[in-house]
Amino acid sequence: MVNLIDGDARGCVFMYRYGDVFFCGCTPELLVRKEGTTVESMCLAGTTSCGETEAEKEERAQALMADDKNRREHEFVVSFMRDVFGRNCYNVSIPRNPSIKALRHVQHLCTPVSAQVMEGRSLLSLASQLHPTPALSGTPVGEAMMTLREAESYNRGFFGGAIGYVDGAGDGEFSVAIRSGVFDGEAGWLYAGCGVVEGSNARDEFDEIDLKLKTILSAFSAPQ
């Protein structure tokens, strides 16, 4: 955890212990934050690498912004967020175009979301409606979840879940528990994922997962 915090913390570093098992990671993705009547979230979908130099980083960021496949993948999440926030909030602000969220190993398309929550809507209610986003499940979410249950031969466990807190006033925040791992003292299982849409290339998606795994793998080496 110290290595994650000191070396590659570009988001929320988390750890949850149950018995002798630890679930930990460093996620860049905010699910929802509430402070008073103000709520925030983000649409995080669409990924490229950072390259080796600042020039490569900028070139790949520009290519990501212009890439049709990644923009469509991102828009699935934006549309979902717009619908959920529209049902529960007013003064909803969602920029027309995404920006680049640069991390140590990858860059993402990111669109921030902010709004004022309607009376009677709680943080937990919002979190339950926002989770899982299409970035975790697919779209439409209900149908995609049924397909995943049929197709996947394993339990995702805590991966992709909402991790965070709620205080006594009902404020707090939850992040999406990605870029993570489960460890039991003898072995570890690392988790990362990608978004597969029409136009996806299997090799590119595999390489994307490999880059994302470097976040949790960085915990096993000294910070640079």
Image: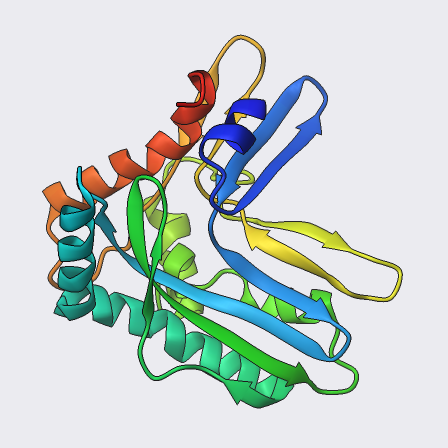
Quadrant in the picture for residue 204? top left
Residue found at the far bottom of this picture: 91
Q: Check the image and report above or below for 10 versus 224.
A: below
Q: Check the image and report above or below for 138 versus 37.
A: above
Q: Position of residue 5 (x, y in %)?
A: 55, 32
Horizontal side of 127 relative to 43 (left or right) equals right
Q: Position of residue 178 (x, y in %)?
A: 46, 44
Horizontal side of 128 relative to 78 (left or right) equals right
Quadrant (top left, top right, bottom left, bottom right) of the C terminus: top left
Q: Nearer the viewer, residue 95 or 138?
A: 95
| Residue at the image point whose x is 43% and y is 30% from the top | 216
Q: Position of residue 222 (x, y in %)?
A: 44, 17
| Residue at the image point whose x is 34% and y is 44% from the top | 193
Residue found at the far top of this picture: 186
Q: How many marks?
A: 0
Q: Position of residue 153 (x, y in %)?
A: 37, 37
| Residue at the image point whose x is 22% and y is 70% from the top | 71
Q: Nearer the viewer, residue 54 or 91?
A: 54
Q: Nearer the viewer, residue 149 or 54?
A: 54
